[in-house]
Amino acid sequence: MNELRDNADVGELIQYIVIKIDDEQYGINIKFIDNIVRMQQITRVPKVDDYLKGVINIRGEIVPVMSVRMKMGLSEDVITNKSRIIILKTESGDLVGIIVDQVNQVLTLDANNVEKMRYDDKKGKTNATFVSGVGHYDGGLVSILDLEAVVAEKDVKEKASNAS
């Protein structure tokens, strides 16, 4: 399932939306973003994992919404006026929403300035396993969110639809 992976060519410029989750900054490749919406009423779905917060209606389509914080093993979401739901679109056309604490900026990075991460598969899930790389810009760093690991799109869609 490589539909949410960054497969950039060397030297290619890639735009990322920089978001805040807890006290960390993460980048999401803009090509996977369908929409960014303000927090709204999320309809809870019974008998699903705690990180699956429920579903919302976007343009007539029912979209599962998940807490990235909880999926990463962090504390429960603290909803503020800066909180947003980022609607991600997979190559199969499915939409999945993720709750983030804040959307900060759009950042353009050269693919050469993004270091890919490598992990030992024998270790358990940690926050680091949700990061596919680190982008370098103007003396700063941004962790690139591995959307495939975070969303696990097949699981999210199946669990949300099977529970109803």
Image (cartoon, rainbow, N blue to C red):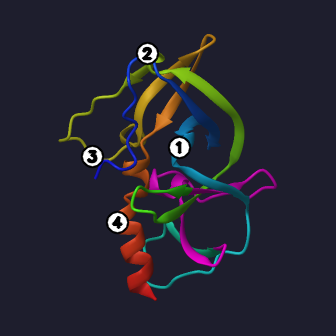
Instruction: Determine whether 163 is above or below 154 in the image.
Output: below
From the viewer's perspective, is the residue at label 4 or at label 1 nearer? 1
Residue beneath label 2, please? 112
Residue of label 1: 31
Q: What residue did someone put label 4 on?
A: 154
Q: Secondary structure at mark 4?
A: helix
Query: Which kind of residue does numbered mark 3 sit on?
Result: Gly
Numbered badge on residue 108: none
* Residue drawn where x is 63% and y is 74% of the image: 56
Q: Which residues are magenta?
A: 58-87
Callout 4 environment at 10 Å: few (<14), some (14 to 19), or many (20+)?
A: few
- Residue in the foreground of this view, choosing between 64 and 3: 3
Mark 1 surroundings: few (<14), some (14-19) or many (≥20) residues within 10 A: some
Left/right placement of residue 56 relative to residue 40 reads left
- Asked if the residue under mark 1 is in contact with the one under mark 4, i.e. CB atoms within 8 Å, the reply is no
Are the residues flagged by discs 3 and 2 in contact, CB closer than 8 Å? no
Q: What residue does disc 3 label?
A: 124
Q: Amino acid at mark 2?
A: Asn
Q: At 40% from the left edge and 48% from the top edge, which residue is drawn?
A: 4
